[in-house]
Amino acid sequence: ALRFCREWQLYVAQSRSLRKVFVSVKGIYYQAEVQGVTVTWLVPHKFSQNLPSDVDFRVMLTFLEFYETLLGFVLFKLYHSVGLRYPPKLLTNKDEDGAHLNAIQAVPTGSAMDTEETNESKEKLKPKKKKKKSNQEIESEGKLESLKDALKNIGKAVEEKEESADDQDKDGEEEKQVFAGDEGQAAIQKNHERIEALTNLFKGMRFWLSREVPYEPLEFCITAFGGKILSADSGCDISDASITHHVTDRETVKDRVKSREYIQPQWVFDCVN
């Protein structure tokens, strides 16, 4: 389940779909716009959980297995819709060090890395021996093909009727849109500019996260809005001159650097909203 959560956050960050963030007592609420659909979910704070003894978790596990399979298919479709390979590449050394989004790498489909991994997976698959088909199997396959042809002809006839009806409706809608004026077009353009500015909110900014701040939600929000996280895992040092923002939750910070801003975690969430 944790793997799917991380892959979902990577997709939202790569597609720049995150829109709102809200921190509450229950946890952190996120809202994203995925293919025109608003998706809201809650990530609870990392506290120790008390498991009730009167709940049969074996029944719950059956539902978990079902939704894990369903979510795998959904993520596969979403990743390919933005030109990314699924599943993303797992960087084992960073994952063992406790990294979150930095431990998985989005691989574009058709890239050199994607073709290499595809060829490796093909080599691992051993060719299976083909069994000779019996006469009954050949006859059943012939009947199935004839049935498929008949169903296709029926489907084409139904589609032609529906297309003719849709064409009449579209003609009326197009006339309304042509004479709608420039107000609708201006509103669409304004909304597009607002989303573009929001998705590039932290573009060009480099953040250093201190140990006492919540790393995973801050990494997710900063990455989703175009920022970059610098840490010891990425081979950087706290004295790096390219750091523009230092996220800390301490009252006093020693050895301040004048070229960077020292901010609290809430500043990042407030900027998003």
Image (cartoon, rainbow, N blue to C red):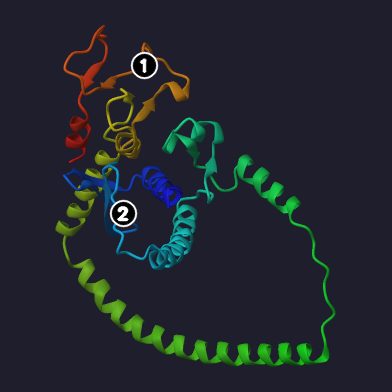
Q: Nearer the viewer, mark 1 or mark 2?
A: 2
Q: How many other residues sit within 10 Å of disc 2, few (<14), some (14-19) or many (≥20)?
A: few
Q: Position of residue 170 (x, y in %)?
A: 31, 77
The answer to whether residue 39 is left or right of residue 26 is right
Q: Position of residue 134 (x, y in %)?
A: 83, 87
Q: CA distance from mark 1 to mark 2?
A: 46 Å
The residue closer to the viewer here, 218 or 60, is: 60
Task: Give the quarter of the image for residue 230.
Answer: top left
SS at mark 1 in the image: loop
* Residue projecting furthest to the top: 255
Q: Which mark is residue 242?
A: 1
Residue at x-position 27% and y-position 72%: 174
Q: Position of residue 99 (x, y in %)?
A: 44, 33
Residue at x-position 24% and y-position 9%: 256
- Residue picked out by circle 2: 51
Task: Give the quarter of the image for residue 260.
Answer: top left
Residue 213, above or below 80: above
How many marks on residues? 2
Q: Earlier in the sequence, mark 1 or mark 2?
A: 2
Q: Position of residue 138 (x, y in %)?
A: 78, 88
Residue 61, above or below 16: below
Residue 269, above or below 163: above
Residue type, mark 2 in image: Leu
Residue type, mark 1 in image: Ser
